[in-house]
Amino acid sequence: MPVLHSTKNLHIVEPPTTTREGVGRFEYTDTYTVFHYGRMPDLIPGKGEAICRMAVSNFRRLEEAGVRTHFRRFIPPNTIEFDLARVPNPDAGPLAPGERNYLVPVQIVFRNELPQGSSVHRRLGSGELTPAEVGLRDIPVAGEKLEHPFIEYATMLQDVNRFVSSSEAQRLAGLRDEPFQVMHDTAVKVNEVLTEHAAKLGLSHCDGKAEFLVSSDARIVLADSPGTPDESRLMYDGVHCGKQVLRNWYVANGVDIPTRQLIADGVPRNQWPRPVPLPPEFLPVMSDLYRSLSETWTGERRWNAPDLHAATQAIAGLIGQ
């Protein structure tokens, strides 16, 4: 995950080498990102700790399900320690098969539903995708559930990531057939575990993504923070439980940042328009939403946040859904 687009601060405790993992720490912050802009101007109190605790819960749940992860330990209240791999230079070309101890520069996206805000709707409208590729006969309505998860690959070290074919993903990842299949199968397993847990809580795990590293012993290892609202699209009773509600507000009020067009036009980042701050009354409501989601997901009551029904209704009433 490029630092520019991340809401986590990376601290390197011990740098990785070509033959050995290092040690890193993610400090989860109260920032949020939308539109590939980078960090937006506001802080949402408590968001970092809420998401960190969800990440820890997910790592433990996934490891119990047999998924190997880079997670080492939780450092309360908002930091995890993990095995750190080398990050490839995206300008150096595809990795050679047989390399070890590196972050795979391709992410796997899994989609179970197509809610409002899913890029699939835009890409179907532009002809980038066909319904058949998604597993459908016709153009879907917003909120349509898929009979089988739709699996995609995307780059992850660029200003604006792009979707790529399976064959290009394998080439960019520098993986032979067997480890590439293992990576795919692991992503499917991650989606199954997260979707099942969400369903038990009355949540919809609409879509999400998984990132991986190749370890020093050439094994595929799950990385980053799967299943948090920064990495997955979670909904409760038709209401988004994450930054999509803020993205919707920016778009509805005509103050979104056209980053794709700015990049295509070659406009330097220091000349991009500054995003407007959120109305101040949004911040405590978003704070309640993240804390409520975290308490619901982990089963730990730390803040006595409103229950998820009350928190999502407050969001729907204030920001609109």
Image: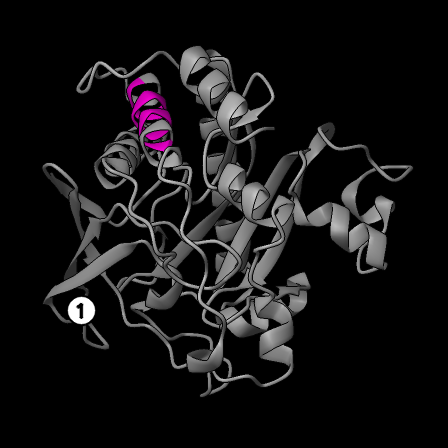
Tell me the magenta residue range.
286-295
Taking the image as shown, residue 11 lies to the left or right of residue 168, namely left
Residue sitting nearer the eye, 287 or 23: 287
Vertical comparison of 321 with 77: above or below: above
- Residue bearing the label numbered 1: 20
Quadrant holding the N terminus: bottom left
Residue at left offset 37%, top offset 77%: 88
SS class of the residue under badge 1? loop
Quadrant holding the C terminus: top right
Q: How is the image coloured?
A: one colour
Vertical comparison of 264 with 179: above or below: below
Query: Measured from the top left, where is residue 319 in percent x and y?
Result: 52, 31
Visible in this render: residue 95? no
Taking the image as shown, residue 46 lies to the left or right of residue 3, namely left
Residue sitting nearer the eye, 138 or 105: 138
Query: Measured from the top left, where is residue 199 in percent x and y?
Result: 51, 17
- The kind of residue on which mark 1 rests is Arg
- Write down the quadrant of residue 256 in the picture: bottom right
Query: Measured from the top left, where is residue 238 in percent x and y?
Result: 60, 21
- Write down the quadrant of residue 52 in the picture: top left
Prevailing SS of the magenta stretch:
helix
Residue at left offset 37%, top offset 26%: 289
> Is the residue marked by circle 1 packed among few (<14), some (14-19), or many (20+) residues within 10 Å?
some
Vertical comparison of 118 with 240: above or below: below
Residue at left offset 46%, top offset 48%: 210
In the rendered image, the residue lying farthest to the right is 138
Visible in this render: residue 269? yes
Taking the image as shown, residue 55 lies to the left or right of residue 158, namely left
Query: Measured from the top left, where is residue 299 in percent x and y?
Result: 27, 15
Magenta stretch holds residue 68: no
